[in-house]
Amino acid sequence: MQEPTLEQIFGSYMAWKMDEGTWIISFMNGTENMYLLEGDEKALLIDTGYGAGNLRAFVEKLTDKPVLVANTHFHPDHAGGNGEFERVFVSPGWETDAPSVYGEGAVPFDLAKLPFADYEKITVGDGYIFELGGRKVEVLVAAPAHCNSSLFFLDREHRMLFTGDEYESAQTLMYDNSRNPEAPYNVKERLDNLKANGERLKGLEKSYDFLFPNHNGCPIAKEYLNQYIELVDGVYAGTAVIEDKLNHPFIERDEKASALCRVRWKNVSIFIRKDLLMTVYGK
Ligand SMILES: [Zn+2]
């Protein structure tokens, strides 16, 4: 049997329609999603994958509308393919996480070979609205928790909230993953932000029915936000459950994995550096 090519591994897409005008684009063997939101006049592509170079053609088969492109955050599996497009909307924090995309070996492709390698980055702030024609998508800037560059996207017409990697069904990665030695990382701040972002999104919960994260399946129930908030409280109370075994075949392969633990609360969990966690656990 022939080994699969990098393009087959990182650039095999499958799409299905969630509702009229909303496509889920699944890749990485179904473990990761991107989203395509169509309005009457334009479409918005949320995230661009690893940069295999074949996403734009795939997206243009799904929609005939002009496609705007935005990143949930500046990580290699979400922003790697930005250079297939002339311009991409990014968060104010993108530069802090940029080494995670552009660092050596960060992605399996030469991003300089993409057709718009020097694409324009347009920074969007809180409250920015993508007008797609009969469909508005509102930007909320996340306080740094999973990373330094997350945006949430709220689609009130279709009652969807896109949460990137900040809230997922299986686990949210809460250790420093910026590959940037200059990036600030304070464990208490990150946990406080995980809770504060969750409370902010909960305050808007009359506007959406489900959360749409980028990994491990979607949609997921709004209830996950409550559980993440409780998880943070459970860390400070010393009641959240710490597991030393990650039970994650991919992350376990990373040499840094031995420093991590899983902290569980009901259905949700986080991966975090255990030594740093213990400085705030039960305190
Ligand atoms: Zn991420």
Image: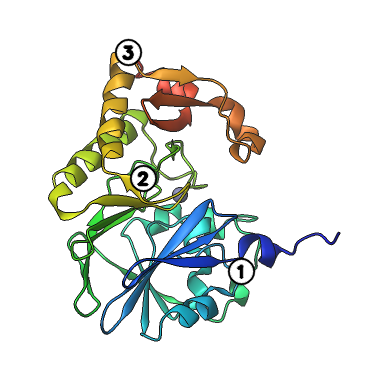
Residue 122 percent across, percent down from the top left:
33, 72
Left or right: 255 with respect to 58? right
Q: How is the image coloured?
A: rainbow
User: In the figure, 28 relative to 260: above or below?
Assistant: below
Identify the residue under disc 3.
282
The extreme right residue here reads: 1
Give the residue type at disc 1.
Answer: Ala
User: In the figure, 281 relative to 104: above or below?
Assistant: above
Identify the residue under disc 2.
166
On whether ligand 1 comes within 8 Å of the CB at mark 2, the answer is no
Q: Earlier in the sequence, mark 2 or mark 3?
A: 2
Between 179 and 259, the one lying in front of the other is 259
Give the residue type at disc 3.
Answer: Gly
- The crowding category of the residue bearing disc 1, from other C-alpha atoms within 10 Å (few below 14, some 14 to 19, many at least 20), is many
Q: Is residue 125 at least partly visible in the picture? A: yes
Identify the residue under disc 1.
52
Give the residue type at disc 2.
Answer: Glu
Q: Quadrant of residue 136?
A: bottom left
